[in-house]
Amino acid sequence: MSDALLVVEGLTKRFGGFTALSDISLSIQPGERLGLIGPNGSGKSTFTNCISGTLPIDAGSVTLDGRRLDGLPPHQRTRLGLARSFQLPRPFGSLTVAENLRVPMLYAGRGGTDTEAELLEMVGLGGKALQRPGDLTQVEMRKLELARAMAASPRLLVADEAMAGLSNSEVDEILALLLRLNAQGVTIVLIEHIMRAVMAFSQRLVCLVAGRKIADGDPQDVIRNDDVLKAYLGE
Amino acid sequence: MSNLRFWASGLLLVLVGWLLGRLVSNEYAFFAGYSVLQYILLATAWNILGGYAGYVNFGTAAFFALGAYVSVALNKLYAPPLPVLIVAGGVASGLVGLLMGSLTLKLRGVFFSIATLALAIVSQAVITNWEFVGGASGAYVLRPRQGPLGGSYIEYLFYTMLVMAVAAVALARTIERSRFGYGLAAIRDDEAAAEASGVPTLKLKLLATVASGTLMGMAGAPLPFYVAYLDPPSAFNLAYAVNTIAMPLVGGTGTWIGPVLGAILLTVVQETAMVTISSAANLLIVGLLMVGFITLAPNGIVGMVRKIREGRR
């Protein structure tokens, strides 16, 4: 699969004597919608931090569009087209909503034609440009988090639990937003616990358990996989 | 304020300062004016790193005194004109900022601040033991009677500081509204999120430290001529570090006008107290004002004004 957008090979991450991720290999095709699931503590967020460069990896490699990312700091990976959103929204609190988008546009925007206003309109924050993030609701904060990641005009977006703690209708809003982004050509990795959303979104599903990849394939097959059921429901 | 109006006001300020200087015959006015301008420059310099990027520097005295001592040393060697001393002081302090930054900026928040405090202590020890610049017993610097533009030398120092202060404020304002400024604001608010947004955090912090250190060194370069006698306890005086932190806090960090307002308010209050109450009341007053502002108006004068304006709407 030489035309894959992201190739992860043999990724291993240890914290002292604890192996958080063990020999993970994964490749993602351009335009794909990939769901990443796993019980709490299975290594999903560590995986996000490892490919985005926040944590150094102990073994293996991460390649984006043929380019090795190993050792590059996070800001360079963002500029190369790998953006991530944070599990708990981390807005720039002293800047306005519009300025929150201006930062990645100034530093990582790769000639995209979207303006701040267009992007805010797309995620449904049209009237909020001049407000501070502190005045936003939870769901608006999640939208801002995604919009800021999008402002770096990424080719691959890793959305780390963008829906956790939201109500049913809010989950649908974010889901629709992610599908819209994907339709515009952005490859998306969705890390999520809410199975309804994951199943509706994903074309392919990967399951991590205790730092190992135990399943990878069609979502319907993966959720019927014995190992996956065992991990979630016990023996 | 629009760009045109800002630059026009800056130029006007320099002109008015010069004209006023021509009318004033009292030397004390220049001494007091110099002190206000010096603190505007120092507070603005501190704010570039402390206010914009959120990295608190306790080592103002080190950068400032280094500029002053580079002046003493060069003056002893061949007595170049003041602008040369200012450039040399700025370069020296900028280099120290670069060195210190590359060693400590990987530390976040409070650890960086502790490192700056250490720098101040170490550099004072070095200067105290450097005999060429007077060591512990200090150095006398002969202040020329006449400035090169006519008028007394103190008058000349005052104009020099006026130009530097206005230029520094203009620089700070330019940074604030630039790509660089947005990067620093992102670092201040959330460093991990800044990295994820493509901001090269380490590089920007280093640049801010160098800019801030350079301006502080430039502020210190004319000091030996201003005081005529310079020894380590006065050059590394705690008051410089405390004042340069208090002024932006009182005025409001994060904007160019905050340090200016804070510097004017605090210096005027201190100068008045020195003349009317006692010369020892200075730091007490600064301390009280700082505590008052942090508890009652954490965003300083600028924050207070903004609140009142927003309340009216």
Image (cartoon, coloured by chain):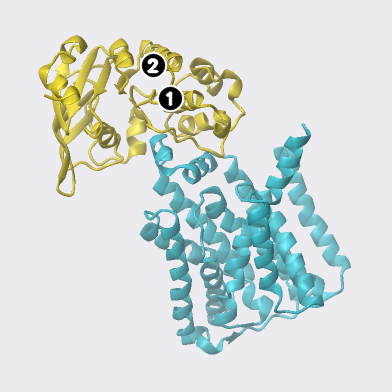
Chain colours: A yellow, B cyan
Query: Which residue is rendered at x = 63% and y = 65% of the image?
Result: B243
Mark 2: secondary structure? helix
Do we see residue B194 in this rendering? Answer: yes
Q: Position of residue A25 (x, y in %)?
A: 14, 27
Q: Are marks 2 and 1 in contact (CB under 8 Å)?
A: yes
Query: Which residue is rendered at x = 82% and y = 76% of the image?
Result: B276
The quarter of the image holding the C terminus of chain B is top right
Q: Position of residue A221 (x, y in %)?
A: 16, 11
Quickly name the residue at label 1: A146
Q: Which of A206/B176 is in front?
A: A206
- Establish if A195 lies above or below B183: above
Q: Residues within 10 Å of mark 1 (few under 14, many from 20)?
A: many
The answer to which of marks 2 and 1 sits earlier in the sequence is 1
Q: Amino acid at mark 2?
A: Leu
- Establish if A100 lies above or below B46: above
Quickly name the residue at label 2: A178
State left or right for residue B237 relative to residue B269: left
The image quadrant of residue A196 is top left
Q: Which of B82/A66 is in front?
A: A66
The quarter of the image holding the N terminus of chain B is top right
State left or right for residue B98 relative to residue B53: left
Looking at this rendering, what residue extends furthest in the bottom direction? B137
- The chain letter for the residue carrying disc 2 is A
Mark 1: secondary structure? helix
Mark 2–mark 1 distance (CA, rounded to whole Å) = 9 Å
